[in-house]
Image (cartoon, grey):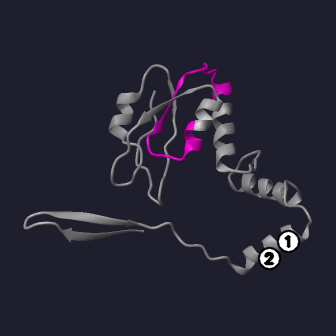
Amino acid sequence: MTEKTEIVVGKDETLKKRHIGTGTFVATERMRELINEALDSGRIAYGPLSQQFERDFSGLHGCKYGILSNSGTSSLHVALQALKEIHNWDDWDEVIVPSLTFVATINIVFHNRMKPVFVDVEPQTYGIDAALMNLAVTERTRAVIPVHLFGQITICNCFFR
């Protein structure tokens, strides 16, 4: 949640100070049961519980398959790799990324032999600036990876032809 507080700087000037929270977490009793079930199984890597999650998740979303990965980085890497393969993108085609992001966003672009194109972020949500993004699109642009930071939603129309 974003809270705004006005700070008086001078006679006619005010600045808005924002608090960016990182959220809270409360484990429910059901969560604790599932964690204990996984720990009691003697298997903390991919196994029956992971497979059940994939089936449940894909069913919930009406998909034939659901694939669990070990991290968001791995998920992004495989997603970009699949898009590159399916759409026959060339090595060093461009992927637009925000200039303020976690390093994994950039790494997965390089690991797929593509070129990251950095676009500055807008100051309210720290998301990619849509106007600047549109200026960065070239004939070699194949994708945009919007990143939501600090609990703020990136507002951009990342669809183009």
Q: Position of residue 39 (x, y in %)?
A: 86, 69
The residue to which callout 1 is attached is: 37
Q: Label 2 near label 1: C-beta < 8 Å?
A: yes
Residue 78 higher or lower than 38, as above or below: above
Magenta segment range? 84-106
Residue 29 higher or lower than 137, as above or below: below
Residue 74 higher or lower than 112, as above or below: below
Q: Amino acid at mark 2?
A: Glu
Q: Position of residue 148 (x, y in %)?
A: 49, 52
The circle drawn on residue 33 is 2
Report whether 60 appears left or right of 154.
right
Q: Residue at x 45, y 45 (%)?
A: 100
Q: Position of residue 35 (x, y in %)?
A: 79, 71
Quarter residue 111 falls in: top right
Instruction: Residue lying at the far right in this picture: please name it.
Output: 42
Q: Residue at x 79, y 76 (%)?
A: 33
